[in-house]
Image: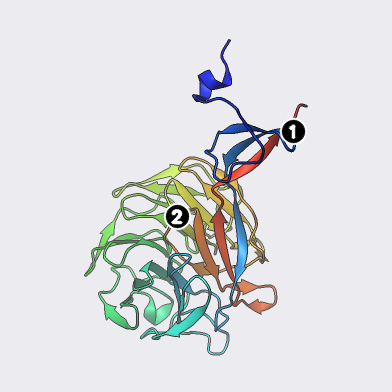
């Protein structure tokens, strides 16, 4: 008969206390609590961070949880903002403004090398590059549009949606690529120029569609658990997040969905239901940053951080 040691390669340890850093799948007997325990994969949760200096929605973002950047957005009065803020993992500080105040646009890159892409009306084709302190106008999109999404770096980005166009950035110019299979705006995404994923969006209503990009073509993947638009995404194609957004007719969402490259599952909710937020687009899906957006009471200044724990300790019981 197979034993645990035969299957896993090690025996069940007899310990006076739980190990501080067990291997996922490890099982032990705690002689103090008289319980059989094991380490399972970690789970993600949101925690609150310090607020933005300027509350706003329809902003864009880039970077990571400990080195994030957000820019632009709708602040009510004035409606179009150029304000840029940098996050150090604890607090936000203002930096150089965009040359063109804008809303409903995309961001990509890092805190010290970011892009602001597209937007509404006069800003629909404009691209700006950030060097850590100031913005410079660079080459325009081939297809100007608002409500698109972008992933990648300041020298290798992918902009897609708003509604179907896909373009790649090589550090100096944009090249048109194959369109999304489903045209949509206000979508979210994650990944790189050669391994991206796009999900959600509208119209005519909140969409569930997911598509994966291999550097050339978009292919249809498994759908979201529910239709949503105006959320934010981060991570990679095999570990992506969607958080916040809006469901019909006008409900703000606190949902978090997690994509493993094949299927979507539901994770822990945001602390505050929010639509049109921004945040970091980098990372591996185990950490994420969300800031701003619109809430039931108006414009949001709140910040939340997503972190997946290394492991979870479970107690095994007989049922």
Badge 1 crowding class, 10 Å Cα cut-off, few under 14, some 14 to 19, many 20 or more, is few
Residue 82 seen in the figure: no
- In percent of width and height, residue 61 lies at 45, 70
Along the viewing direction, whichever of 174 and 98 lies nearer the viewer: 98
Residue 147 is situated, as x and y percent measured from the top left of the image, at 46, 68
Tell me the number on the disc at residue 1: none
Relative image position of residue 101 (x, y in whole percent): 42, 84
Q: Nearer the viewer, residue 277 or 207?
A: 277
Query: Residue at position x 40%, y 58% from top?
Result: 164
In the rendered picture of this protein, how many numbered marks are placed on residues? 2
Find residue 290 and report its image quarter.
Answer: bottom right
Question: Which residue in the structure is indicated by mark 2?
Answer: 235
**Which residue occupies 46% across, 67% down?**
66
Q: Name the residue that disc number 1 marks.
A: 34
Task: Specify the quadrant that holds the C terminus.
Answer: top right
Answer yes or no: is residue 310 visible.
yes
């Amino acid at each position: 008969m197979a034993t645990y040691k035969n299957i896993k390669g090690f025996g069940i340890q007899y310990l006076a206390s739980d190990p501080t850093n067990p291997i996922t799948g490890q099982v032990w007997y705690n002689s103090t609590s008289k319980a059989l325990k094991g380490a399972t994969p970690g789970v993600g949760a949101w925690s609150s961070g310090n607020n933005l200096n300027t509350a706003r929605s329809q902003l864009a973002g880039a970077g990571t949880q400990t080195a994030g950047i957000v820019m632009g957005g709708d602040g009510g009065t004035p409606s179009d903002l150029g304000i840029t803020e940098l996050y150090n993992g604890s607090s936000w500080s203002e930096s150089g403004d965009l040359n063109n105040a804008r809303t409903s646009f995309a961001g990509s890159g890092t805190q010290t090398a970011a892009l602001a892409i597209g937007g509404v009306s006069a800003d629909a084709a404009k691209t700006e590059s950030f060097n850590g302190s100031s913005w410079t106008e660079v080459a325009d999109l081939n297809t100007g549009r608002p409500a698109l999404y972008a992933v990648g770096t300041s020298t290798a980005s992918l902009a897609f949606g708003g509604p179907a166009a896909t373009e790649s950035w090589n550090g100096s110019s944009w090249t048109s690529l194959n369109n999304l299979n489903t045209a949509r705006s206000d979508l979210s995404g994650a990944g790189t120029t050669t391994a991206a994923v796009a999900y959600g969006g509208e119209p005519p209503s909140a969409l569930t569609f997911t598509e994966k990009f291999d550097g050339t073509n978009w292919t249809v993947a498994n759908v979201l658990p529910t239709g949503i638009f105006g959320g934010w995404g981060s991570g990679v194609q095999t570990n992506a997040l969607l958080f916040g957004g809006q469901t019909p007719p006008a409900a703000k969402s606190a949902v978090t969905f997690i994509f493993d490259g094949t299927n979507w599952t539901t994770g822990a909710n945001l602390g505050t239901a929010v639509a049109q937020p921004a945040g970091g687009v980098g990372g591996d899906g185990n950490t994420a940053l969300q800031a701003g957006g619109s809430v039931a009471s108006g414009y949001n200044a709140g910040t939340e951080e997503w972190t997946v724990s290394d492991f979870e300790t479970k107690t095994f019981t007989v049922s």
